[in-house]
Amino acid sequence: MRTLLRGFVVALLIVFTVTLQVSVFSHFAFDGVAPDMALLLVIGAALVRGPTYAALVGFAAGLVLDLAPPADHTAGRWALALVVVGYVSGLAKADGAQSVIGTLTIVASGAFIGTSLFALSGLVLGEPSVTVSSALQVVPIAILYDVVLTPFVVPLLLVVFRRLEPAERW
Amino acid sequence: MRHHDSRGSRAVIGLLLLACVTIITIDARHGTSASPVDPMRAAVGDVLGPVEDGASAATAPLTAVPDHFRTVSNLSTENAALQQANARLRTQLRAERANANRNLEVDTIGAFADQNGYRVVQAQVVAMGPAQSFSRTVTIDAGTRDGVGPDLTVINANGLVGRVIESSATTSTVLLAIDRDSTIGGRLASSMELGFLDGTGDVNGGGRLTLSLVDHTVTPAQGDTVVSWGSIHGAPYLPGIPIGKVVSVHSSPAELTETANVQPFVDFSALDVVGVITSQAGSGTTVASGGAR
């Protein structure tokens, strides 16, 4: 019952984050690149709960990003990218102690992996909107933006995911 | 324990990756025709559209701040450009007064609709996809309930915005003219020459459309206005809607064609109120355009 409730809260969190990303943070876009709140959510999950949980959150958040308007790309591409981001970030967390630099590194590499994988899947599928030059232009800005937002967003996410953690694990 | 954990975890990751690839394959295989994912898209749109609408309305005072600064910086560059243009136009006007009819500026969406007998549904942009997703699409808060559906033309006070590609009950997704997927038939207002406008994917002030003319012996002039030419079946683009003006011309000897960079009249990074043209009164009516006179 409690697990169900927790799942529901995470689902709400995902919807809230994606809505925030497309409706509010799109106004704060730099060169068209908006802060990737869904990606930060997945990394927050990875830092608290580890790779498997983060991959699950990544799958759900990615699917919402893929299907919620105004998404127009082939469905499943963000899901794929965020599953990998969640898994890799969770593994990276397990390897290193939690420090500010460590967290920033995980966010930077997560943003790199996420945006690159999304671009790459577009190139593989031959979607005309994705070109190598546009990807090279977008990826660095996306990484920078996510790293800049980390001190404001990630601590908040850590608190939320810690509260959502089942007590018996401790 | 740890060993077991990582094995189980690997199985979960494997399943998730498989699920992603399956969804991608199913959606990609169906291309533009009806994909099994479409009903899911519509369902999610039905739920999240109003949420996006609400979030956009609730945070309007907050989001107006960056938009304001963007507008100010756009205005100052625009001001400089306008002063230059003004000086040039003055000299041009002295030389050839007849050139005046080139102008087909449209003041407001309403005036445009009245003038051409279109029925226009006004809508607000409530969400915009990030550059990380590469496609240039926005969500507007008008859907099938308001008579908005796929392949309808979307305009704003300055000109052509794009076309509707998908609609749920209360929201629609608009493919912006600037998207790399977007190709619009356009014509030069001065010479009525036909061409195709392709988006470059850049929504910022420097965002351009690429115009390639059908008749490659014609060289577009700088400052020439480009209007939509209209699609054969009346959808998705109606004729005579201002799109942009030619800012530079490139010739490539290898392709024997000349392409022009067209600066769109619409500022795609600061879209707010748009109009969807839902019907045309009197299908035979041609839209008045400068070149026709």
Image (cartoon, rainbow, N blue to C red):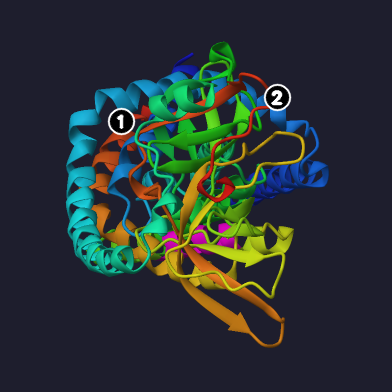
Q: Which residue is label 2 attached to?
A: B39
Q: What's the residue type where badge 2 is placed?
A: Pro
Give x and y (percent) for residue B117. 54, 22
Q: Mark 1 vs mark 2: give the one in front.
A: 2
In the picture, the disc for residue A163 is 1
Q: Assign a secondary structure to mark 2.
A: helix
Q: Is residue B225 magenta?
A: no
Q: Report the front residue among B171 and A25.
A: B171
Q: CA distance from mark 1 to mark 2?
A: 35 Å
Give x and y (percent) for residue B271. 37, 40
Residue in the image at 68% along x and 57% along y: A127
Instruction: Please tell me whether residue B184 is drawn above or below residue A95 in the rendered image.
Output: above
In the picture, the disc for residue B214 is none
Magenta region, residue range? A109-119
Q: Report the front residue among B168 and A112.
A: B168
Instruction: Determine whether, in the image, residue A163 is placed left or right of residue A66.
Output: left
